[in-house]
Amino acid sequence: MSTAIAQDRALHGTSSSSLGLSISVAQIRCVALVVVLAAAGVTRAAGEGTNLVPPIIDAVEARATLGEIADGLRSVFGEYEETATV
């Protein structure tokens, strides 16, 4: 790593990718917070028994993963377990 890149990272708190993009740590934290809050909105709506579609759309638009959304729903509703019949 060149000295100029190291100085830039130290000065601005950024990391550079192979594409030459710079993303600050603050930007990463902000995006992560938005995703967490959106996924929490799904969990809150599930717990309140309100319409789940709007908070799920908000979570998807905030780039929450399917796993993050499903974890919130699982925490409220649990998992389906099939009963064995013979």
Image: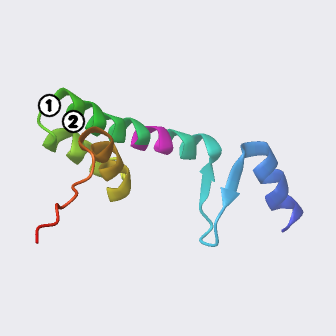
- As measured in the structure, the alpha-carbon distance from the residue carrying label 2 to the one carrying label 1 is 5 Å
Q: Is residue 41 above or below residue 25?
A: above
Question: Which residue lies at the image location 32% right of the left edge and 57% below the top edge?
Answer: 66
Tell me the amino acid under the disc marked 1: Gly
Outermost residue on the right side: it is 3
Dots 2, 1 in contact, CB < 8 A: yes
Q: Is residue 50 left or right of residue 12?
A: left
**Residue 40 on the magenta segment:** no
Tell me the crowding category of disc 2: few under 14, some 14 to 19, or many 20 or more residues within 10 angstroms, Cα based. Answer: some
Tell me the amino acid under the disc marked 2: Ala
Question: Which residue lies at the image location 23% right of the left edge and 31% below the top edge?
Answer: 47
Give residue 4's position: percent from left, percent from top: 84, 59
Question: Which residue lies at the image location 27% right of the left edge and 45% below the top edge?
Answer: 73
Q: Give the labeled residue for mark 2.
A: 46
Between 55 and 11, the residue placed more toward the observer is: 55
Residue 40 marker: none
Between 65 and 72, the residue placed more toward the observer is: 72
Tell me the crowding category of disc 1: few under 14, some 14 to 19, or many 20 or more residues within 10 angstroms, Cα based. Answer: few
- Magenta residues (range): 31-35
Give residue 1's position: percent from left, percent from top: 84, 68
Q: Give the labeled residue for mark 1.
A: 49
Question: Which residue lies at the image location 35% right of the left edge and 36% below the top edge?
Answer: 40
Q: Secondary structure at mark 1?
A: loop
Mainly helix, strand or loop, the magenta region? helix
Q: Can residue 65 be seen from the camera position used here?
A: no
Q: Can residue 40 be seen from the camera position used here?
A: yes
